[in-house]
Image: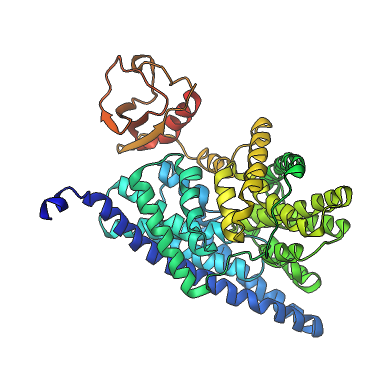
């Protein structure tokens, strides 16, 4: 019996335990964030109902909203890394191109995002939840005195736990880290991240119950003979994603305004006031819109008006630089597009109105795929948050179509574009600290079949080791790279961004 324990890989067990610890703490923090947002947001219908009946109080509410906006701006002024979604900043930290202060971001993101979301601005909670969870992981690693590699794993676990606690979606927490952030698999990473994600989800279940984040009711299996419409809608959503990507340039539009940059944040807060007074159903990230659309058919003209309104208000809010998640707004806009397309198909084919709900769910996944270029994450996420496991096949067809078309028309993932815009302003300087970059060699890339002696890495970076079929070895000049090899490359921490750019070109 004792000899059996000698062969147990205790290092893997230690990462599982660390993952559970990170998941527990991140789950509590993100659940508290989610609870606080719900409590404040629940007050908004009563406040705006009171204001409609007592218009003399509107000026008081305007002043209060401006004070809250000022607090959010003040909190973010000294910590620009809390602005926006937060996922791109987390990727930059893991890649070594950004250096984040975990405690400063943690408390600032928590408070600022709670105020932004609680006031009903048209943004989501997933980005703040992921960044808050990631900062919890970084903080725990610092307390445990872990190294950089361990820090990256615990940040990843915390980020997955954040998404899991935000949406009761543990598998999505794991998949988004593997597909969107790391682009690779490793046993240690999977064990730690999944442990954190499941733990956070367990705690979230205890606080918010076991209901799915978006309960849209029972769905029938979509008829196989009508799958052509799924391909057509998937193509349309990729093109819609191209339009949405163009408007992610809103910061440049803001820069042309004759006002200081620190005043941008007041604009979305001012817009939310008339929204609450005259169209209260449009408050919040968009979950209410999705559930309303799924309950029955809505006139196409009304859907177009809702789409235009949400499209503009979300981009105004996101472009202002306030803490703002994009997932729920993207899903809600996808749902609206799905409802519009569904109306057309139902009228042409005579399909039962019951299938409108199917188009709404499929379009949510397709539109998210066109923006994120992460089809696997989209499939798992939509399946989890709607509890529609029977719809996985049509969702997959949708997302695959949207991904292929988005790739053909040259769409880049939102988080990578955002990160590139941010890091492009950071000067490349020698820092005197060693950083490691891990990559997998892609089939048919320049590196596939290349010899190490023919590889000219910039800034004196070097290939430290190669992992091939679970075996590691130190390469020599005549070593030939093969597709699937995992390379560890060492460089100065100040040159990580430039080395990554070079590797992206050759791989």
Task: Please name whichever residue, 142 or 236, is drawn nearer the observer in this view of the structure.
Answer: 236
Task: Please name whichever residue, 368 or 397, is drawn nearer the observer in this view of the structure.
Answer: 397
> For residue 371, which quarter of the picture?
top right
Residue sitting at 42 percent across and 61 percent down? 198
Task: Please name whichever residue, 468 or 77, is drawn nearer the observer in this view of the structure.
Answer: 468
Rendered position, 195 above or below 283: above
Is residue 346 in sight in this rendering?
Answer: yes
* Residue at the far left in the pictured view: 2
> For residue 321, which quarter of the picture?
bottom right
Residue 207 rendering spot, x and y as whole percentages: 49, 74
Task: Give left or right: position of 446 versus 318.
Answer: left
Residue 143 rendering spot, x and y as whole percentages: 28, 60
Residue sitting at 70 percent across and 50 percent down? 363
How many numbered marks are there? 0
Task: Give left or right: position of 367 versus 148.
Answer: right
Task: Give left or right: position of 84 versus 455.
Answer: right
Rendered position, 240 above or below 173: above
Residue 490 rendering spot, x and y as whole percentages: 32, 32
Is residue 84 in sight in this rendering?
Answer: no
Q: Quadrant of the N terminus?
A: bottom left
Residue sitting at 66 percent across and 36 percent down? 406
Rendered position, 175 above or below 410: below
How is the rendered protein coloured?
rainbow
Residue sitting at 44 percent across and 42 percent down? 182
Residue 247 rendering spot, x and y as whole percentages: 71, 45
Task: Give left or right: position of 434 versus 210.
Answer: left
């Amino acid at each position: 019996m004792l000899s059996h324990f000698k062969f147990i890989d205790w290092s893997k067990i230690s990462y599982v335990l660390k993952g559970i610890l990170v998941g527990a703490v991140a789950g509590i923090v993100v659940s508290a964030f989610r609870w606080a947002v719900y409590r404040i947001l629940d007050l908004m219908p009563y406040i705006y109902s009171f204001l409609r009946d007592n218009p003399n109080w509107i000026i008081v509410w305007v002043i209060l909203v401006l004070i809250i906006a000022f607090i959010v701006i003040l909190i973010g002024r000294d910590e620009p890394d809390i602005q926006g979604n937060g996922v791109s900043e987390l990727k930059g930290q893991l890649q070594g191109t950004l250096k984040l202060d975990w405690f400063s971001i943690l408390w600032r993101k928590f408070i600022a995002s709670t105020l932004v979301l609680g006031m009903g601005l048209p943004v989501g909670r997933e980005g703040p939840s992921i960044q808050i969870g990631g900062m919890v992981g970084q903080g725990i690693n610092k307390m445990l005195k872990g190294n950089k590699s361990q820090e990256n794993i615990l940040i990843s676990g915390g980020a997955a736990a954040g998404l899991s606690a935000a949406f009761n979606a543990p598998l999505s927490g794991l998949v988004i880290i593997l597909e969107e952030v790391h682009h690779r698999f490793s046993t240690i990473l999977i064990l730690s991240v999944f442990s954190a994600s499941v733990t956070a989800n367990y705690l979230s279940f205890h606080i918010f119950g076991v209901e799915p984040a978006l309960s849209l009711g029972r769905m029938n299996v979509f008829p196989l003979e009508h799958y052509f419409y799924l391909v057509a809608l998937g193509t349309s959503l990729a093109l819609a994603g191209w339009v949405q990507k163009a408007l992610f340039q809103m910061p440049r539009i803001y820069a042309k305004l004759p006002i200081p940059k620190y005043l941008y944040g007041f604009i979305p807060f001012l817009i939310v006031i008339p929204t609450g007074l005259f169209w209260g159903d449009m408050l919040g990230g968009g979950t209410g819109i999705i559930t309303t659309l799924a309950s029955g058919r809505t006139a196409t003209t009304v859907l177009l008006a809702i789409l235009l309104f949400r499209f503009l208000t979300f981009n105004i809010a996101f472009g202002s630089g306030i803490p703002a998640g994009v997932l729920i707004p993207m899903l809600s806009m996808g749902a609206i597009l799905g409802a519009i397309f569904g109306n057309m198909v139902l009228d042409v084919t005579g399909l039962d109105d019951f299938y409108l709900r199917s188009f709404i769910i499929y379009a949510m996944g397709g539109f998210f795929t066109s923006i994120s270029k992460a089809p696997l994450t989209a499939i798992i996420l939509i399946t989890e948050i709607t509890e529609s496991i029977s719809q996985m096949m049509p969702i997959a067809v949708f997302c695959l179509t949207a991904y292929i078309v988005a790739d053909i028309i040259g769409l880049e993932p939102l988080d990578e574009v955002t990160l590139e815009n941010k890091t492009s302003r950071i000067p490349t300087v020698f820092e005197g600290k060693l950083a490691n970059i891990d990559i997998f060699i892609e089939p048919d890339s320049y590196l596939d079949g290349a010899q190490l002696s023919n590889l000219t890495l910039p800034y004196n970076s070097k290939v430290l080791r190669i992992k091939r079929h679970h075996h590691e070895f130190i390469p020599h000049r005549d070593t030939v790279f093969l597709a699937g090899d995992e390379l560890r490359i060492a460089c100065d921490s100040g040159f990580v961004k430039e080395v990554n750019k070079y590797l992206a070109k050759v791989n």
